[in-house]
Amino acid sequence: MSQPVLTITHRMEFSGAHRMDNPELSQERNEEVFGVCNRVHGHNYTVEASLAGPLDPETGMVANLVDLMRVMREEVFEQLDHRLLNEVPWLQGGVVSAETLAVALWERIGAREAELGAPLVCIRVCESAAAWAEYRGPNATA
């Protein structure tokens, strides 16, 4: 009998501000495209990172959630909490949106997969209870 594949997720909150702005566009075009979001404004973000894999018969876990919690604290909370996201070095140079934040966090958390014990399968960045972006990696299909 094959091992079931399970998914575990850790959710973390942080507060941050950003300005939706494309440096390639004029100020007038940025205001037209992004409206009030072209102004500096903040969110209480929620980030969820999910790992997936078979259940380890020895531990009863897919991976140790403590490791995922540590990596997320280091890569999300310590890097982004109470910051202007447009000034975070690894987010500079483009529009800082929930979508681009999800991709950037995938790259940072995914780069530490060896510490996590299971592959990263999803990053969800929620700007509010009603709006979020999900990224399932560069090889995901729609």
Image (cartoon, rainbow, N blue to C red):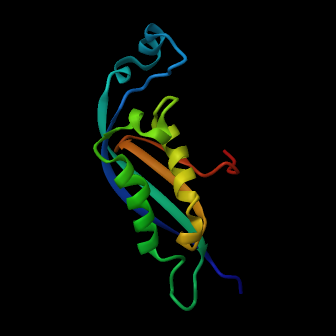
Residue 37 x, y percent position in the rendering: 37, 24
Picture quarter with the C terminus:
top right
Which residue extends farthest front? 89
Query: Looking at the rendering, which quadrant does residue 132 occupy?
Result: top left
Mark count? 0
Which residue extends farthest top? 28
User: In the rendered image of this protein, does residue 100 appear above or below residue 24?
Assistant: below
Residue 60 x, y percent position in the rendering: 51, 86
User: In the rendered image of this protein, does residue 76 appear above or below residue 64?
Assistant: above
The residue shown at (58%, 81%) is 55
The residue shown at (45%, 72%) is 67
Residue 27 x, y percent position in the rendering: 43, 11
User: In the rendered image of this protein, does residue 5 appear above or below residue 75?
Assistant: below
The residue shown at (46%, 39%) is 89
* Left or right of 42 in this view: 133: right
> Observer-nearest residue: 125 or 92?
92
Residue 92 x, y percent position in the rendering: 48, 33
> Observer-nearest residue: 130 or 118?
118
Picture quarter with the N terminus:
bottom right
* Left or right of 51 in this view: 66: left
* Left or right of 45 in this view: 93: right
> Observer-nearest residue: 100 or 125?
100
